Amino acid sequence: MKKNLVLFVLFILPIVAYLFFASGVNGFIKLPVLTPNVPEFNHWKTIDGKEIQLDSKITILGFPGENVELRKGNFFNLNQKIFKKYAEFKDFQIVILVPFGSEEQVKVMTTKLATLNNRSNWYFVMASNDEIQLFYNQMKLQEKVNTTIGTTNVFIIDKERNVRGRKGHVDKDDDEYREGYNTSLVSELHNELNDDVKIVLAEYRLALKKNSANRKKYGL
């Protein structure tokens, strides 16, 4: 009981307080679904042969293109502002889809990231350019990307493989739409992406807490 109270104070309460006091940053209590039920990965694997799936994971998904080395600053930003905060959550992962042919660059990048922290749920997943492009197209985003070149944006995929983001009224004079988060901008990662990851994590934890309470209520 004491442990649950501590977790509530440390994790849930700040989110509730943020949502109450935020004005114009994110007016959503539940982060909207932009694209429902994107495909599962087609047996794609990391460079060391581990098969990665989206199901039952909260995923930050990136498409850096063929020049992985060019994105090293973006990965560092993502590591410092997002990954280090959520790496201990077993249902959280960062997945970077990289075209075949970039294996040596990926090896160098994973070595660099390993010097910063435990990257046990940060994955570089290899697939062909055509496979990555098809997957990106099936996400049905407004931003059109040639995945050979890639994008500095990353995207939130929830446990049901829905693309999550911001869509709707933030205040009476403004509509907000956000599908991606620019890893070149530290402020955007620190504010928008961090806030939205908190909201998605809180959704699942509140749902789990409610489900546990119902099971206890009915003696299940």
Image (spheres, grey):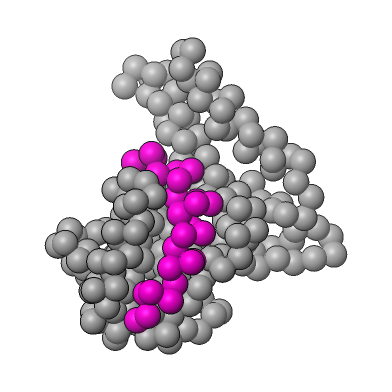
Q: Which residues are magenta?
A: 66-90
Front residue of 112 and 209: 112
Figure check: 211 above or below 34: above
> In the drawing, does residue 20 fall left or right of residue 214?
right
**In the figure, 210 relative to 65: above or below?**
above
Q: Residue at x 34, y 17 (%)?
A: 219
Q: Is residue 82 magenta?
A: yes
Residue most extreme to the top:
2
Q: Quadrant of the C terminus?
A: top left
Q: Does residue 6 sit above or below 111 in this rendering?
A: above
- Magenta includes 128? no
Residue 76, given in percent of the width and then of the height, sits at: 46, 60
**Image point (61%, 65%), residue name:** 185
Horizontally, residue 60 falls left or right of residue 20, namely: left
Asked whether, in this view, residue 34 is left or right of residue 112, the answer is right
What number of labels is visible? 0
- Residue 185 higher or lower than 220, as above or below: below
In the rendered image, is residue 39 in sight?
Answer: no
* Magenta stretch: dominant secondary structure: helix
**In-image side of 95 versus 35 (left or right):** left
Q: Residue 151 in the image: state x and y as whole percent.
A: 48, 77
Residue 17: x percent and y percent? 70, 35
Identify the residue at horizontal 84%, vertical 60% (top origin): 172
| Residue at left offset 55%, top offset 79% | 142
Looking at the picture, tell me which residue is in the foreground, 130 or 169: 130
Give the camera-side residue of 51 and 204.
51
Residue 136: image quadrant is bottom left
Q: Is residue 18 visible?
A: yes
